[in-house]
Amino acid sequence: MDDFYKEYILDHYRNPRNFGHLDAPTATAEDLNPLCGDKIRFELQVDGDGRVTDVRFSGKGCAISQASASMLSESLKGEMLEDVARFSQERVLENVGIGISPARMKCAMLGLKVAKSAALGEIAHWPDEAPAG
Amino acid sequence: MIAEPDARAARIAADFPLLAQPTSRGKRLAYLDSAATSQKPQAVIDSLVHYYTHDNANIHRGVYELAERATDAFEGARAKVARFVNAAEPAEIVWTRNTTEAINLVSFSWGLANLEPGDVILTTQLEHHSNLVPWQLLAAKTGAELRYIEVDAEGLHVLDDLDEKLRGVKLVAMSHVSNTLGTIAPLAEIIPRAHAVGAVVLIDGAQSTPHFAVDVRALDVDFFVASGHKMCGPTGIGFLYGKRALLDAMPPFLTGGDMIREVGYERTTFNELPWKFEAGTSNIADAIALGAAVEYLEHIGMDWVAAHERALTVYALERLQPFVARGLDIYGPKDVTKRSGVISFNFADIHAHDLASILDLDGVCVRAGHHCTMPLMDKMGWPATARASFYLYNTERDVDQLIVALDKAADVFKVA
């Protein structure tokens, strides 16, 4: 657990990528983690083919939730909307690249939950909530 | 040199078996989250084991020896809690699951029977959700207005406009001690003025009863509520104190067995106090164990507990002071005589959750988040805080461990 907070996690936390708002987003969603009050909003720009051409996220929270959302925002650009809706928790954990304790899993997955909700047009639920603790 | 109170706390810690347990990383445990729940002394654990091993039977109705023994222990525990808070009689103590249930009891029973449109419920901006949400719902149901005593930037109650705030007030419901900031409410000033306008006063003692001597008659509160698990007792047991005249006049809350006198197919008459409010088989074992907890605290002495926590808070604030220049914000009253052993803080741009995770690596248990006081956090502009809270078993060594772990957190997050 010495790699608990790697350099790039802190970099994404302090300099989040794609942070802010789009002028006229095609799809949006926001949610909060009632446990800690972390809030995240995702805004997607989708072209006529259903491809995500631009992404912004906003909100506040811990390094895990913010860095995870920031890295996710980079992964989503160029994806098809249906692939955003299917984006897996495993890929988010690969992005984050550090051991996430069960207590912090909700932090790591908040961004994904919101981005998927934006793509689906409804609140996303995990097939199995187990990894979220 | 270790001060004598600290040496005694170290001996007291030996009464709590959990505290001797290292973490999975082999670190010494520094348990600084007693405001959430306290650890349990061996005497309380023994009480639970003894009850189920020797005394278990349903109470009040059995005529055999075992049932009498269980009933005696259960009612004996009620008498111990009554003595602990200086109630006039044990019948003024009603068992509940916890503070939250006790507040709901008053809200549903007294509140629905006594509040009308235009009446005012006065609370404060500091309240735990459990002493806020029931009143929001009661106000919505009855047409009463919910009004707030404000707090300043330190979390101290603003009383300049108290007379104005008290206009039309039927119920004052407020916490004795803030679970987020440790603020001790100036009840001696507020309660007489609330009574002067004819208001009934409920005090949430979840964060006071475990930490200093409470005297419900000296305070002249009408209702007083607390949870066993924060005062060395088990989870699932708490109590409501109420003045007899008020409790007598109140309708039952939950209904069913044990709370009745006579039941017919057409109508039912209710049992007398305190059983009128204790429907169904009670949490017998945990009530008895709470009695053991109260005896344990009396044996230590609540004045000693209060003095020890004050000394430890002063020590912790001194040790934290050097971090202020590096971006540590310490919240709550600056005057330590106005705060309990609760210290909420944020450190530079480290989110409280990250901070708590890093401290956990070193065996330091602190709370992080909104502490069930979301409106207060919004008002203060804090997304979250980390909170260290002390109890009778904490020592300067626990604080030292926190300080070392904070230094490590600064390294991890590269705080200058």
Image (cartoon, coloured by chain):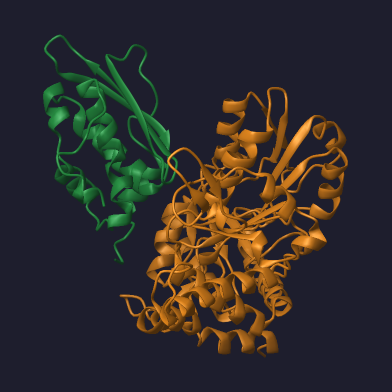
Chain colours: A green, B orange
Q: Position of residue B88 (x, y in %)?
A: 75, 65
Q: How many numbered marks have been drawn onto this rendered protein structure?
A: 0
Q: Is residue B219 above or below residue A39?
A: below
Q: Position of residue B92 (x, y in %)?
A: 67, 60
Q: Nearer the viewer, residue B173 or A82?
A: B173
Q: Is residue B141 above or below residue B157?
A: above
Q: Nearer the viewer, residue B394 or B288?
A: B288
Q: Is residue B318 visible?
A: no
Q: Nearer the viewer, residue A25 or B336?
A: B336
Q: Position of residue A42 (x, y in %)?
A: 32, 27
The residue depicted at 54 percent of the width and 65 percent of the height is B228
Q: Residue furthest top?
A: A48
Q: Is residue B407 visible?
A: yes
Q: Is residue B225 shown left or right of residue A30?
A: right
Give the image quarter of residue A57. Answer: top left
The residue depicted at 38 percent of the width and 68 percent of the height is B361
For the N terminus of chain B, the quadrant is bottom right
Q: Is residue B394 above or below residue B100?
A: below
Give the image quarter of residue A65. Answer: top left
Q: Position of residue B252 (x, y in %)?
A: 56, 45
